[in-house]
Amino acid sequence: MRQNLVAGNWKMNLTYPEALALVEEIARLAGYGSVGANGLQVVVCPPFPLLHGVGQALPQGGNFHLGAQNCHQKESGAFTGEVSAKLLASVGCEYVILGHSERRQYFGETDELLSQKLKAALAAGLKPIFCVGESLDTREADETFDFIGKQLTDGLFHLSNEEFAQVTIAYEPIWAIGTGRTATSAQAQEVHAFIRERIARAYDAQAALDTTILYGGSANAQNARELFAQPDVDGGLIGGASLKAADFTAIIQSF
Ligand SMILES: O=C[C@H](O)COP(=O)(O)O
């Protein structure tokens, strides 16, 4: 179901004590009882070792949810150092980020592999947040739509209607991630509308309307309100600004 959603991707940051202090401060600043008043869902995605503890520390029974940043494609087995979707679900995760550009770039994750990870996540009852986004070279070559269309087709559109209904999409232009160079609200809206149109083609118009599509890439307390006001932008996948309670809370309160 389409919903307003802000997810914080902590990446490989914060120790356990720092994480607990951050969650406590976000809950205090956000006045979390009112966070759900406009239907906003908030997801925090810590590194693996912090998941269980952060999940316990999150405000319970409300609109705060726990997410992971990755999972393995197999359910269990001899895969030293890896973490399965089933394990994530067992410590309280509801969401998992898949296909982040850092995973694609530094860990060689392909659309083929991501297809398998999506299936594994869905089988474990997790809701995937599937990332797409172009490099600066691709944008400057005027190939953004072809590139993202291919990521959607190869990575995502193999899912059944029922499976796809569990997926949130995050548009993250690589040139905007961690660079301080945010996509303009018009650039974000243009790509989000394109993604929605491709969903309508692959599934149907209702599926396109029902899909939550987030923007990610140097979103912050200053630009979130304008980005989230775009008709096809349903929220954000926030990196750097999710590590500071005041900034993340201001982003949450931008709706
Ligand atoms: O997953 C989050 C994105 O990579 C955005 O990161 P950023 O907000 O630090 O640019």
Image: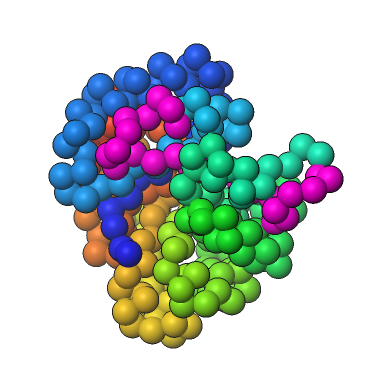
Residue 107 visible somewhere in the drawing: yes
Instruction: Identify which residue is drawn at 21% across, 50% down.
Output: 39
Q: Is residue 218 among the parts visible in the rendering?
A: no
The front one of 46 and 77 is 77
Q: Is residue 110 above or below residue 215?
A: below
User: Which residue occupies the extreme right position in the image?
Assistant: 78
Q: Is residue 147 left or right of residue 235?
A: right
Percent across and percent down for residue 101 are 60, 51
102 or 188, nearer to the observer = 102
- Please state which of residues 108 and 143 is positioned toward the viewer in this rendering: 108
Q: Main secondary structure of the magenta part?
A: loop
Indicate left or right for 71 with 27 as reference: right
- Give the image location of residue 249, x and y in percent: 28, 31
Q: How is the image coloured?
A: rainbow
Height in image: 161 above or below 148? below
Check residue 60 for magenta coloring: yes
- The image position of residue 81, as x and y in percent, is 77, 37
Is 39 above or below relative to 23? below
Q: Nearer the viewer, residue 21 or 196?
A: 21
Residue ID at (30%, 46%):
41
Q: Residue at x 32, y 70 (%)?
A: 210
Q: What quarter of the picture does the N terminus occupy?
A: bottom left
> Horizontal placement of 179 versus 37: left or right?
right
Q: Which residues are magenta?
A: 55-79
Question: Which residue is pictured at 60% across the width and 34% down the height?
Answer: 48
- Residue 133 in percent (x, y) is at 53, 59
Asked whether residue 141 is drawn in magenta, I would say no
